[in-house]
Image (cartoon, rainbow, N blue to C red):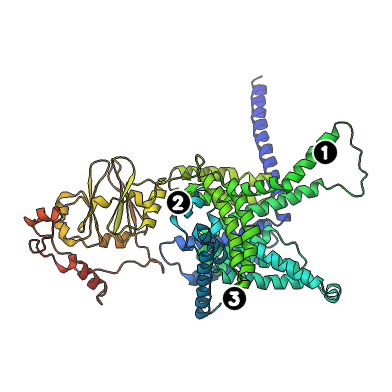
């Protein structure tokens, strides 16, 4: 009996183990089937530009310059192995991915021609602004020429809160519309000539002419990254017309990304590249899904159609309504939602804010671009040399006035702008992988991988670094958290841009000017007090060290602090040369520093600081005249003269010294 019982127990364990093995084998079978589907649809190729982009990011993020002599042979070796392993799909694609990664690591027109073209853009922008006038004129000039220098701060705030700041840029929508206008216009013009229409491929001729028009438009508007992507995508689509292939596919977008990475690899680190490709990838994914759904619903022409029974007519009616909505306003809103969701993580990471009402703002923007901006830009530019363009710019300004009114009303709604604090640097990697998994894969199993990746990215977004002080890379400005929990800016000549970046990283929506403490500064420096009571001193003049080194807890200065300074924490010129911009936190355990430069960093765009010779001079003993100095009085004769190394003139001389 005991043997029988032991046999039963062993059989039960074997059954449990066998059940787990069966489930694992079933899961592996599903995964293999999904992978075969992705390979059959040739979706794995789309990850090669992702691998190349990862190589560029790894190159940009390295502390030291990698050896290009090793990367080239390594990429060539992997390419050879990929050719030999082309019979095994998984190994082949992995080796191709490594080749693309290491290929992404290493990284026209003449200068006079570009300068002349830029002068022409400036003249056209000034004319448009003078004719239309006001903020509408500045926006019209930006939409036509790409010049945003004429925009006022109030206009920027209005369009930013409405989520339509991209109205001031030359976007991919404009590039696509310009190419479409050229293509349709040339094709109809050639079709009006019967001999050409009947005997020659005028569709392909029109595609070539549209390519030339799109290239000229891109060069004339400044050759920005967003228009580069749109130009390459447009050229590839028109090239597909020449080759009698399908134009709007994810593969064409992948080719456009590869071309941008080859021409300008550093663009992948910028917000323009990220937002542009994310939005278009989402729109192409929506288009592909609609085409697949339409193909699945398309009835077989050979099969007899059954007559709708009672109750089926209502269902067919609602299906037709949904189909019409998906192609009309409903389709536009859904596409806008998908593009907004795809770019939300990059907007939050780069700009620390989101606009919930973008579904209202984007259709308005598209309306102005399609009806007013693009036709007006083409017609007005053609009439500009003749001086007959004034009425065109007034027409464009009329549409912009309507959008600005709507944007102002949207900006008044509650929660029009959500301010977000800085993300953890690694969070954007997982959010990007989640987006790519959702738009590049076609099977549900592979798309489900986006969920855990997005969860990790959101955890990183919530675990972003906080700071109590921020210091500019040159030490000329600093921000500190006061007793009210908000940041205050200390600077002699404050930079509003830097102040706004600090505030946005802290999820503070105030304008930069509102956080500047002008009353806390004089010609010698600025003073402030942290929330825990410690004092901060920003020193501009070397004569202030005699007092501030004995009274302040933290000293920040663009000068060199003399030896013997009694402040608990000193951040001077030499320290900032090593670290770059700094943020400081003051937990109970001490001081935490986060630097823009890594220790020992040596890259072509971030060279290490030059070696300094000799120590700084010691600080002199305090003199009675220091009381007058603290009161803001000028007493140069009563203050002892410090060494040359502590004076601004000597600092400049040190920089020019051949010993360095």
Q: In this picture, is 626 found above or below 266?
A: above
Q: Position of residue 216 (x, y in %)?
A: 62, 72
* Helix, strand or loop for disc 3: helix
Q: In this picture, is 433 found above or below 92?
A: above
Upstream in sequence: badge 2 or badge 1: 1
**At 50% from the left edge and 68% from the top edge, which residue is drawn?**
126
Q: Position of residue 565 (x, y in %)?
A: 16, 55
Give the residue pinned by disc 2: 425
**Quadrant in the rendering for residue 609:** bottom left
**At 68% from the left edge and 44% from the top edge, which residue is drawn?**
444
Upstream in sequence: badge 2 or badge 3: 3
Give the residue pinned by disc 1: 316
* Helix, strand or loop for disc 1: helix
Q: Position of residue 441 (x, y in %)?
A: 66, 51
Q: Is residue 575 left or right of residue 511?
A: left
Mark 3–mark 1 distance (CA, rounded to whole Å): 57 Å
Residue 385 is labelled as: 3
Image quadrant for the N terminus? top right
Image quadrant for the C terminus? bottom left
Q: Nearer the viewer, residue 544 or 154?
A: 154
């Amino acid at each position: 009996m005991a043997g029988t019982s032991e046999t039963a127990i062993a059989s039960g364990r074997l059954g449990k183990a066998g059940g787990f093995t069966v489930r694992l084998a079933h899961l592996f079978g599903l995964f293999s089937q999904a992978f075969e589907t992705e390979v059959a649809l040739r979706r794995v190729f789309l990850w090669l530009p992702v691998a190349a982009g990862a190589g560029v990011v790894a190159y940009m993020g390295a502390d030291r310059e990698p050896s290009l002599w090793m990367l080239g042979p390594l990429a060539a070796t992997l390419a050879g192995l990929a050719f030999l392993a082309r019979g095994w799909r998984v190994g082949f694609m992995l080796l191709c991915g490594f080749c693309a990664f290491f290929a992404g690591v290493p990284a026209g027109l003449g200068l006079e021609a570009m300068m002349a073209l830029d002068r022409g853009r400036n003249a056209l922008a000034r004319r448009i602004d003078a004719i239309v006038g006001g903020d509408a004129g500045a926006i019209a000039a930006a939409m036509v020429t790409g010049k945003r220098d004429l925009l006022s701060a109030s206009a920027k705030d209005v369009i930013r809160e409405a989520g339509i700041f991209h109205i001031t840029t030359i976007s991919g929508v404009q590039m696509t519309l310009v190419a479409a206008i050229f293509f349709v216009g040339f094709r109809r013009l050639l079709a009006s000539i019967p001999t050409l229409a009947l005997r020659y491929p005028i569709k392909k001729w029109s595609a070539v002419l549209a390519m030339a028009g799109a290239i000229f438009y891109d060069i004339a508007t400044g050759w920005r990254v967003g228009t580069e992507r749109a130009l390459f995508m447009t050229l590839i689509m028109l090239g597909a017309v020449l080759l009698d292939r399908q134009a709007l596919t994810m593969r064409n977008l992948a080719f456009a990304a590869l071309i941008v990475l080859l021409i300008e690899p550093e663009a992948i680190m910028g917000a323009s590249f990220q937002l542009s490709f994310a939005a278009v990838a989402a729109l192409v994914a929506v288009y592909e899904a609609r085409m697949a759904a339409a193909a699945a619903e398309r009835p077989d022409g050979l099969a007899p159609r059954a007559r709708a029974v009672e109750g089926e007519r209502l269902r067919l009616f609602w299906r037709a309504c949904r189909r019409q909505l998906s192609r009309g306003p409903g389709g536009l809103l859904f596409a806008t939602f998908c593009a907004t969701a795809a770019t939300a993580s990059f907007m939050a990471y780069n700009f620390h804010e989101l606009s919930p009402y973008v579904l209202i703002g984007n259709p308005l923007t598209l309306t102005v671009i399609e009806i007013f901006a693009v036709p007006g830009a083409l017609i007005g530019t053609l009439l500009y040399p003749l001086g007959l363009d004034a009425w065109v710019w007034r027409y464009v300004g009329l549409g912009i006035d309507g959008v600005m009114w709507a944007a102002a009303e949207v900006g008044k709604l509650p929660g029009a702008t959500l301010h977000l604090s800085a993300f953890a640097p690694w969070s954007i990697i997982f959010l990007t992988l989640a987006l790519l998994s959702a738009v590049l894969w076609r099977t549900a199993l592979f798309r489900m991988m986006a969920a855990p990746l997005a969860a990790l990215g959101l955890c990183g977004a919530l675990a972003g670094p906080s700071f109590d002080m921020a210091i500019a890379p040159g030490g000329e400005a600093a921000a500190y958290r006061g007793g009210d929990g908000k940041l205050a800016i200390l600077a002699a000549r404050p930079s509003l841009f830097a102040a706004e970046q600090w505030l946005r990283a802290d999820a503070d929506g105030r304008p930069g000017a509102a956080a500047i403490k002008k009353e806390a500064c004089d010609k010698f420096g600025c003073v402030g007090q942290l929330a825990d009571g410690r004092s901060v001193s920003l020193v501009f003049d070397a004569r202030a060290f005699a007092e501030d080194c004995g009274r302040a807890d933290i000293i920040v200065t663009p000068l060199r602090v003399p030896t013997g300074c009694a402040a608990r924490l000193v951040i001077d010129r030499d320290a900032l040369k090593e670290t770059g911009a700094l943020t400081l936190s003051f937990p109970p355990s001490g001081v935490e520093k986060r630097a823009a430069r890594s220790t020992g960093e040596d890259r072509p765009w971030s060279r290490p600081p030059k070696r300094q010779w000799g120590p700084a001079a010691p600080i002199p003993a305090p003199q009675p005249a220091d009381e007058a100095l603290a009161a803001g009085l000028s007493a140069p004769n009563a203050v002892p003269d410090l060494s040359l190394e502590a004076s601004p003139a000597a600092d400049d001389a040190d920089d020019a010294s051949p010993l360095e």
